[in-house]
Image: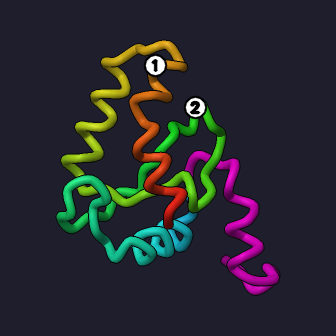
Amino acid sequence: MNDNRANLGDYIQSTHTCYRQHEKYKERIRAKFNYTCQLCGKPGRDVDHIIPFAISHDSSPLNLRVLCHQCNVDTRRARKDANLPLEQWYESIKTELERVKEL
């Protein structure tokens, strides 16, 4: 990032609708969760969308979490295998959404 940017906050603001986040943005998300997987509690570095970007188009901090690699792989596999209607998929992640609201 060059000096022409006002600050990192402005840059982060502009990334909320981008699928790929800048590495500094990911580091802030990792630090927020103490580099800990939000599903199993092990050390984690993968930044994951809670509501998939393809559905939400949202990369804001409220829609991101940190996962260990294994939980990230398992979550992706479950999403791809499920092929659920949107209403059923929403019910399956309702608990996760409630947890994020508390943060």
- Left or right? Give the position of 83 relative to 16: left
Spatial distance from mark 2 to mark 1, Cα to Cα?
17 Å
According to the picture, the residue beneath numbered tag 1 turns out to be 88
- Left or right? Give the position of 78 relative to 18: left
Q: Where residue 38 appears, x then y in whole percent?
A: 31, 59
Q: Nearer the viewer, residue 5 or 86?
A: 86
**Which residue is outermost to the bottom?**
3
Residue 42 on the magenta segment = no
At label 2, the amino acid type is Ala
Dot 2: element? helix
Residue 91: which quarter of the image?
A: top left
Say whether disc 2 or disc 1 marks the residue closer to the N-terminus. 2
Q: Where residue 33 appears, x then y in whole percent?
A: 38, 71
Residue 16 on the magenta segment = yes
Q: Quadrant of the N terminus?
A: bottom right
Q: Where residue 71 appears, x then y in whole percent?
A: 23, 47
Span highlighted in magenta in the image: 1-20
Q: Where residue 90 appears, x then y in whole percent?
A: 50, 29
According to the picture, the residue beneath numbered tag 2 turns out to be 54
